[in-house]
């Protein structure tokens, strides 16, 4: 054991298991928390518990929400003719930040990855297809510009086009191999604006 306390070791391990947190950062965060007043630590742990207890999938778009349907799906101001398909809830935030898009969303919760055995049934694809009705005119595929995003885009395009709707993909311009959520607002706006019909 590296630590003088088993409970410190446990917290370091939990932090290290989070995305993009290495062992050193995990240690820094743990010692930082340890130095905080009791109220802060109470608030920190309670907020995690409350979030986990209250947040659910929206039954329409599958974004995380406390109200079902979520504020976007229940808003009268959104354009119901457009559905923008993204991989993760973070991508919705990134696109909303551009303030250029007023349609609906659909969150797949991942992308197809044949090497890791992630197929269509592991994503919210069936749920997407069941949303296609007479009201929907266009589905915009805004997946990450990497191999998994590409495989998923091709799959969805083949699946959706026979349903008689317009299927488009956001323009390249979002750097290849990166995550959509890391694209800056201007780039994302341009990518959405210059979308290409499939
Ligand atoms: Zn929703």
Image: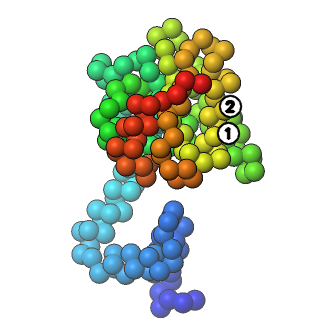
The dot on residue 151 is 1
134 and 62: which one is in front? 134
Instruction: Please name the residue that numbered disc 2 is placed on.
Output: 155
Image location (x, y in percent) of residue 164: 60, 11
Residue 149, quarter of the rendered image: top right
Q: Is residue 102 above or below residue 118?
A: above
| Image mark for residue 21 | none
Q: Is residue 66 above or below residue 16?
A: above
Is the Cβ of the residue at disc 2 closer than 8 Å to that at disc 1?
yes
Q: Position of residue 55 (x, y in %)?
A: 41, 42
Label 2 element class: helix
Mark 2 sits near ligand 1, with its Cβ under 8 Å away = no
Which part of the image, by quadrant, shows the C terminus?
top right
Q: CA distance from mark 2 to mark 1?
A: 6 Å
Residue drawn at x 50%, y 50% as measured from the top left: 175
| Secondary structure category for the residue under label 1 | helix
Residues 100 and 37: in front is 100
* Crowding at mark 1 (Cα within 10 Å: few <14, some 14-19, many 20+): some
User: Residue, x 44% and y 31% (percent of image)?
Assistant: 194
Residue positioned 34% across, 45% down in the render? 185
Quadrant assignment, res 197 = top right
């Amino acid at each position: 054991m590296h630590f003088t306390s088993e409970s410190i070791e446990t917290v370091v391990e939990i932090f290290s298991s989070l995305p993009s947190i290495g062992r050193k950062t995990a240690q820094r965060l743990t010692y930082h928390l340890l130095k905080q007043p009791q109220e802060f630590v109470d608030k920190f742990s309670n907020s995690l518990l409350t979030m986990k207890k209250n947040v659910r999938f929206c039954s329409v778009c599958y974004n995380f929400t406390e109200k079902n349907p979520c504020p976007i799906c229940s808003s009268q101001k959104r354009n119901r003719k457009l559905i923008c398909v993204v991989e993760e809830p973070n991508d919705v935030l990134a696109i909303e930040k551009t303030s250029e898009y007023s349609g609906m969303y659909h969150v797949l919760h991942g992308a197809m990855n044949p090497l890791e055995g992630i197929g269509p049934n592991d994503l919210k694809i069936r749920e997407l297809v069941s949303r296609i009705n007479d009201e929907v005119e266009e589905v915009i595929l805004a997946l990450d510009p990497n191999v998994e995003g590409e495989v998923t885009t091709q799959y969805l395009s083949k699946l959706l086009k026979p349903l008689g709707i317009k299927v488009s993909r956001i323009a390249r311009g979002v750097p290849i191999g990166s995550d959509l959520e890391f694209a800056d607002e201007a780039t994302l706006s341009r990518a959405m604006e210059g979308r290409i019909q499939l």
